[in-house]
Amino acid sequence: MLATALCLVALAGPGSCSNPLVLSAPVRAPSGVSNYIDNGFVSFSIAAHFFPEYAGNLTSPNLFTRTLLRVLARSTGKAPYIRVGGTSSQKLALNITQEGQDGVPKTETIGPTYFEGFYNFPGSRFHFDLANADLGPNRVPNAVAEAKIALSYIKGNLESFEIGNEPNVYNFQGYRPANYSQDDYVGEWSQIATAVSENVLTGNQYGINPRTSFQALTYFLGPFGSSSFDVTSAFNTSHVDQDGFVKSASLHIYPAGANPSRQHLFMNHTNTASTLDVLIPAIKYLATSYPNIPLVLGETNSDYINIGNQADVSAFGNSLWVCDYMLYAMSINVKRVYMHQGTTFGYSDFTPTEVRPPFYGQLLVAAAIGTSPRMQIKPVNLGLWNLSIYAMYTESILSKYVVINLEEWNETTPYDRPFRSFNLEVPSDVHVTSKDKSKYDIRLLKFFGVL
Ligand SMILES: *[C@@H]1O[C@H](CO)[C@@H](O)[C@H](O)[C@H]1NC(C)=O
Ligand SMILES: *[C@@H]1O[C@H](CO)[C@@H](O)[C@H](O)[C@H]1NC(C)=O
Ligand SMILES: *[C@@H]1O[C@H](CO)[C@@H](O)[C@H](O)[C@H]1NC(C)=O
Ligand SMILES: *[C@@H]1O[C@H](CO)[C@@H](O)[C@H](O)[C@H]1NC(C)=O
Ligand SMILES: *[C@@H]1O[C@H](CO)[C@@H](O)[C@H](O)[C@H]1NC(C)=O
Ligand SMILES: *[C@@H]1O[C@H](CO)[C@@H](O)[C@H](O)[C@H]1NC(C)=O
Ligand SMILES: *[C@@H]1O[C@H](CO)[C@@H](O)[C@H](O)[C@H]1NC(C)=O
């Protein structure tokens, strides 16, 4: 029963509740509501060559980044997962006699202190991306050696290993010939998974499953990817899980491609929804045929131009995109979203020393998820491109709305800040009084004190 209406003016300004848009969602979780949301949904991918800067080492840990992740964990009760990987992970050469590491992205030689970074994030579970792209004679032994040293530091906090990165782009990157196929990739993947399982994971002292400890695919969804690689056929035709090594499947998406435009692409719910809707067939296929294998966005952010785009993507509007993108992804049963970070990347949510605007979106998403293990979400479909609403359910009962007004406003222009007012319909037993603030609460995303 919906009875009470809460008036809310989104974006502070000279707003009033005249002419409000009425928003309502069923009180009981309706059909089509998501699965229970992973409290670790707000997760991160860190570019392998920047990991030492984000994490530090034992003598000099990065307490700043540790604190940021702790803030998220405090909201959700679960620390973000961290995946260390990406393009540069394929260029790591291991030198385990070496002390320290350097930051050269072409080929990077790493030693033991690199792995001390895993101690910087208590409570997090980790994915470590093993090299596979380089076809030299050391391909398999190098991956095994990397896995061995990584495990000795990550210990029981290992969520999974990845093997290679974006294999459907290897042809474009010059790692493989044009005829490189998904079957070829699965053959290489299985070879390394078998070697790591037998030589590193079997008999491990940390209680890690020696087989089901690998995150597969890591395909890049975008213009350079070979179209013959796809989630469903990787399982159904190329049989990537024939040996039972797959714990999760990962895709990489940068929805704005190389052409970021805030209002058109990021602050546009229609665009965000259509970008993510392409994942639905794969998610449904896995849920039916491999119910224990979730799909994650294991590396993602707004656009794939790493450098020189900060003015476009490190803006407050991008934090609204983060909210909409992450909430929509959870509504279609993506298991976790790992936003990709790098010290010099314009789109980074945070750097080793600085919080950027998009991180405020993650704070909101973490607050929306909260600590309940039985939280679900469903978008309220308004058919509007510039307004996005989600209904959230705790124990199957409507408990939160998230309202995102995506209309851009440039504060240096003279025109008035636009606003929208809403009536939120809430269950009839909800009465918001000032005494009740701790129970029923309207929170606005604040950025440097601005609503
Ligand atoms: C490995 O590190 C040691 C000690 O820093 C150095 O002497 C050696 O040249 C390095 N080997 C490679 C292959 O980089
Ligand atoms: C640990 O990190 C600090 C700060 O980046 C660096 O100066 C130091 O050389 C590192 N220690 C080792 C053993 O690499
Ligand atoms: C793929 O191309 C490479 C060289 O471009 C060639 O040596 C190889 O035989 C080809 N493989 C297949 C299966 O056609
Ligand atoms: C999976 O493969 C079988 C044949 O082996 C086929 O009948 C089925 O349609 C495929 N499923 C999907 C979702 O592609
Ligand atoms: C929003 O995105 C949709 C789908 O990509 C697009 O058709 C539409 O033009 C966009 N709207 C604006 C205002 O940019
Ligand atoms: C959204 O766009 C419509 C027209 O497309 C406009 O009337 C409205 O003011 C915009 N803003 C909001 C928050 O609805
Ligand atoms: C905001 O408006 C000012 C003045 O019109 C313009 O110079 C600036 O580029 C705009 N900023 C953005 C981020 O669009």
Image (tube, rainbow, N blue to C red):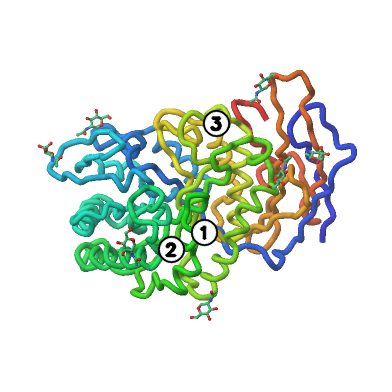
Give the mark nearer the N terminus: 1 vs 3: 3
Q: CA distance from mark 3 to mark 2?
A: 30 Å
Give the mark nearer the N terminus: 3 vs 2: 2
Can you identify the residue that label 1 sits on? 335
Three-letter code, disc 3: Ser
Q: CA distance from mark 1 to mark 3?
A: 26 Å
In this orientation, which residue lies closer to the viewer: 237 or 20? 237
Q: Disc number at residue 402?
A: none
Can you identify the residue that label 3 sits on? 314
Circle 3 packing at 10 Å, graded few (<14), some (14-19), many (20+), is many
| SS label for mark 3 | loop
Q: Hey, which residue is sitting farthest right in the picture?
A: 19
Report if the CB atoms under discs 1 and 2 are less than 8 Å apart: yes
Q: Position of residue 418 (x, y in %)?
A: 78, 30
| SS label for mark 1 | loop
Can you identify the residue that label 2 sits on? 248
Figure quarter occupied by ligand 7:
top right
In this orientation, which residue lies closer to the viewer: 202 or 177? 177
Instruction: Identify the residue at image location x=85%, y=55%.
Output: 3
Three-letter code, disc 2: Ser
| SS label for mark 2 | strand
Q: Position of residue 324 (x, y in %)?
A: 63, 46
Q: Position of residue 94 (x, y in %)?
A: 20, 46
Is residue 26 depicted above or below 109 in this figure?
Answer: below
**Disc 1 Cβ-to-ligand 4 distance below 8 Å:** no
